[in-house]
């Protein structure tokens, strides 16, 4: 029971975080740009945001339905790994602002929680 409950909470948390952070630039680009800095390709920011929202919604649906199979776990962990790498690499290269490291911390935290769940 605890194992099922903890994965459900983790899916909800990651899903909500992805959905909210993903839809933000789509719904109000001006505030997103003010926080994260100017971008040259607004369409790309909004596309990535929409895809991130979709992943978030899929994780929430998986939590609601109790779909905790390997595909769900791979999608959750894989997307967190990719976002963490993008955050760190492009901050180091000074392509994006250091504020993105806040997202990197969130992604790292999600990965740590998934690792605890997987290996506990």
Image: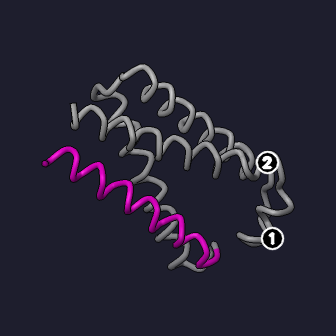
State the residue at coordinates (22%, 46%).
117
State the residue at coordinates (42%, 19%).
65
Residue identified by numbered label 2: 43
Q: Residues within 10 Å of mark 1 (few under 14, many from 20)?
A: few
Q: Residue 34 has which mark?
A: 1
All told, the count of numbered labels is: 2
Q: Residue 92 has which mark?
A: none
Is residue 113 shown in magenta?
Answer: yes
Residue 44 percent across, percent down from the top left: 72, 49
Q: Residues within 10 Å of mark 2 (few under 14, many from 20)?
A: few
How far apart are the two marked residues, 2 and 1, measured between alpha carbons? 16 Å
Residue at the limit of the structure toward the left, as seen here: 120
Callout 1: helix, strand or loop?
helix
Q: Is residue 96 above or below residue 22?
A: below
Is residue 44 shown in magenta?
Answer: no
Do tag 2 and tag 1 residues touch (Cβ < 8 Å)? no
Residue 78 percent across, percent down from the top left: 38, 45
The residue lying toward the viewer, choosing from 16 and 18, is: 16
Residue 77 percent across, percent down from the top left: 36, 45
Q: Main secondary structure of the magenta part?
A: helix
State the residue at coordinates (44%, 46%).
79
16 horizontally vs 7: left or right: right
Range drawn in magenta: 97-120
State the residue at coordinates (82%, 63%).
31
Residue 11 percent across, percent down from the top left: 41, 39
Q: Is residue 39 above or below residue 114?
A: below
Q: In terms of sequence position, does the residue under pointer 2 or pointer 1 come before the other?
A: 1
The residue lying toward the viewer, choosing from 83 and 5, is: 5
Q: Is residue 21 above or below residue 6?
A: below
């Amino acid at each position: 029971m605890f194992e099922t409950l903890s994965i459900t909470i983790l899916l909800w948390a990651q899903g909500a975080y992805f959905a909210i952070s993903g839809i933000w630039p789509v719904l109000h680009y001006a505030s997103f740009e003010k926080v994260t800095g100017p971008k040259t390709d607004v369409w790309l920011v909004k596309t990535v945001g929409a895809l991130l929202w979709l992943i978030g919604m899929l994780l929430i649906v998986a939590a609601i339905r109790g779909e905790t199979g390997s595909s769900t776990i791979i999608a959750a962990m894989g997307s967190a790994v990719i976002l963490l790498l993008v955050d760190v690499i492009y901050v180091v290269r000074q392509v994006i602002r250091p504020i993105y490291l806040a997202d990197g911390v969130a992604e790292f935290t999600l990965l740590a929680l998934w690792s605890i769940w997987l290996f506990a």
